[in-house]
Amino acid sequence: MTLNRVLTGMGAAALAVVVLAACGSEQAGGQQQNTASSVGAQAAATSPSPDAQVAFMEMLERVGVPCVPDAPAATESDDPGPGEHPPTRPSELLPVGEKPPTDVPSPTAAPEQPRLKGVEACEGREHGKRITQALIGLDKPTTIQVRQKLNKLGYIDSRIHGLKAERGVVRFYLDLRVMGGQLALKGASAGKNTTVEAFAHPAEGAFKPGR
């Protein structure tokens, strides 16, 4: 074999190595770019846009309209008028050895669970009715169908939690807490047996129902 042919063979081999290395770099770069795009898409899906947030808040306001209480009517003042004095009664003495009542809870007492009251209790019923009406027509619901129905009603993905299917029933939670509120919903989509119930979740902290 001549020297020129040897050098030519070595040059071709070296060129092949360079080409393969370049292809590998392009493939790796493409994989990294695809991975980054996938991660970005997931982040975008879980982070609602400002417009979606505004639309969500407007939906909450519309649903809650029937629950806004009327302005309280003027009532007569209990303050005594000129020349009047509030009725007095003799103070009652406690029996010997008895301590006055106290409102301080026992350190060993279980913490009281939050409860919905007033406007939030009413809003919970309103949300429950409209969601039940939307889901009751799903004969064999799937998680995708339930999410789509909730999205169509104005409930954004960041407020939908625990969406999963179990034995033909799709269960989910909705975090509707705003401005220190405690309103949350739990639902079970099962055709005509669909149920949606409101409950109170602590206003502070992450949304962790059932814990």
Image (cartoon, rainbow, N blue to C red):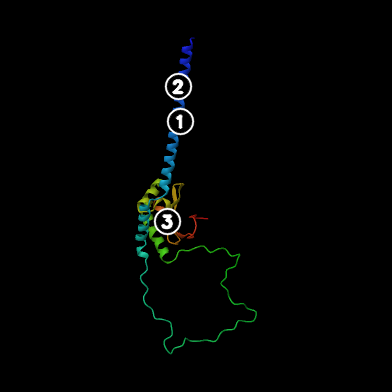
Which mark sits nearer the N-terminus, 1 or 2? 2
Query: What's the amino acid at mark 1?
Result: Ser
- Residue mark closest to the camera, 1 vs 2: 2
Which mark sits nearer the N-terminus, 3 or 2? 2
The 10 Å Cα crowd at callout 3, few under 14, some 14 to 19, many 20 or more, is many
Q: Which residue is mark 2?
A: 15
Give whichever of 197, 47 is nearer the camera. 47
- Residue mark closest to the camera, 3 vs 2: 2
Give whichever of 186, 45 is nearer the camera. 45
Q: Looking at the picture, how far across and down is residue 188, in whole percent?
A: 43, 52
Q: Looking at the picture, how far across and down is residue 119, in whole percent?
A: 41, 65
Query: What's the amino acid at mark 3?
Result: Val
Q: Secondary structure at mark 2?
A: helix
CB under 8 Å between callouts 1 and 2?
A: no
Q: Secondary structure at mark 3?
A: strand
The CA distance from mark 3 to mark 2 is 68 Å
Q: Is residue 42 visible?
A: yes
Numbered label attached to residue 25: 1
Horizontally, residue 95 falls left or right of residue 13, namely right
In the image, is residue 116 above or below residue 206? below
Splitting the image into 4 quarters, where does residue 118 fall?
bottom left
**Which residue is drawn at the image coordinates 45% and 36% (left, top)?**
32
Query: What's the amino acid at mark 2?
Result: Leu
**Which residue is drawn at the image coordinates 47% and 21% (left, top)?**
14
Horizontally, residue 62 falls left or right of residue 188, namely left
Numbered label attached to residue 196: 3
Q: Looking at the picture, how far across and down is residue 15, in whole percent?
A: 45, 21
Give whichever of 27, 38 is nearer the camera. 27
